Every structure is written in C-alpha cells, then in structure tokens.
Amino acid sequence: MFPSVLQEPFEFLKLLSAAIYSVHDTTPEADNIKQFSIFLWEILAGFNFEAGYTENNVFQKMIDTI
C-alpha cells in the first residue's frame, strides 16, 4: 500500500490519531487524559523523564521522511 519509507510516519500518525480519539469524550480529571497529556508533552518538548532530551524532533523526522 505505502512504500516502506512511509510506513514509519504513517504508523506514527495513525497511533497519534488513535490516542487523540481515545480521549475525545473524557473529562480533564480522567486518568487517560493525563497519560495522553504526558505523551503529547514528551513529543512536543522533546524530553522524556527516563531518557532525557531526544536528539531529534519526532515530527520533523516524520515530515523529512515523507
């Protein structure tokens, strides 16, 4: 369906879309919205509490791959 070079960005965006949809009808106090917020913050900030700063921007890597 997609060339192999596009598989990684496609899968990443598909998982991100599913994560966004999963918190569609939740309240701000729900645990899954907190988990999603942490996930989104890690992607946008480029920082993970376990690994530290990432070497590259995840979104930029996906755009460059496309």
Image (spheres, rainbow, N blue to C red):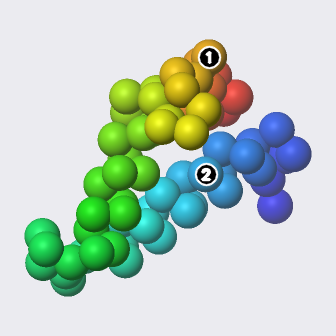
Viewer-side residue, 29 vs 59:
29
The answer to whether the residues at label 1 and label 2 have Cβ atoms under 8 Å apart is: no
Q: Give the mark nearer the N terminus: 1 vs 2.
A: 2
The answer to whether 58 appears left or right of 47 in the picture is right
Instruction: Tell me: residue 54, above or below residue 13.
Output: above
The answer to whether 13 appears left or right of 22 in the picture is right
Residue 41 — which label? Answer: none
The answer to whether 12 appears left or right of 1 in the picture is left
What residue type is disc 1 on?
Glu
- Nearest to the eye among marks 1 and 2: give it: 1
Residue drawn at (46%, 27%), measured in percent from left and top? 46
Q: Which residue is mark 2?
A: 12
Quadrant showing the N terminus: bottom right
- The quadrant in which residue 22 appears is bottom left
Residue drawn at (27%, 68%), measured in percent from left and top? 33
**Extreme left residue here?**
28
> How many numbered callouts?
2
Quadrant showing the C terminus: top right
Q: Label 1: few (<14), some or many (≥20) within 10 Å? A: few
Question: Regarding mark 1 in the picture, which secondary structure is present there?
Answer: loop
